[in-house]
Amino acid sequence: MIFGSESFTHEQWCQQGHSSASTIATVKAALAAVPDIDSSAMTIHMIGPELVLEGYITNVDHRDKAVAVAAMFVGIDNVHDRMLKRFPNR
């Protein structure tokens, strides 16, 4: 998705030349490895260099952990958190 001359694809931003698909796969695998986060309730999208986290979390700490994991791969300025808190069923 390009919105003007200042927008670049993720491949242009990433010096290693990784594709958006490989970045998404890497972040998904890293989130799946975190034992207390339900990564199956999250979706990950790339819009240019920006990584978007969407879905549901049950704990605010899980949000912080998910954002920190994603930031390891794209940088904290390129992570957009759109996750919603969901209360667990009792």
Image (spheres, rainbow, N blue to C red):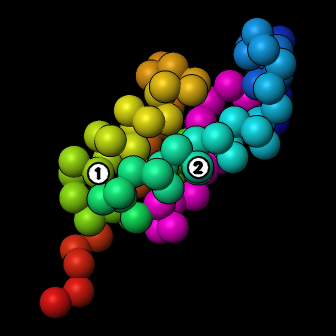
Q: CA distance from mark 1 to mark 2?
A: 16 Å
Question: Residue 1, can we see it?
Answer: yes
Give the amino acid at mark 2.
Ala
**Quarter of the view holding residue 6:** top right
Work out whether mark 1 precedes mark 2 in sequence or the reverse, and give the earlier one. 2
The residue carrying pointer 2 sits among few (fewer than 14), some (14 to 19) or many (20 or more) residues within 10 Å by Cα, namely few
Q: Circle 1 is placed at which residue position?
A: 62
Magenta highlight on residue 49 = yes
Q: Circle 2 is placed at which residue position?
A: 29
Give the amino acid at mark 1.
His
Residue 67, how many percent across, how many down?
40, 37
| Magenta residue span | 39-51
Instruction: Give the total number of marks visible in the rendering.
Output: 2
Magenta highlight on residue 40 = yes
Residue closer to the observer: 22 or 64: 22
**Residue located at (83% from left, 19% from top):** 17
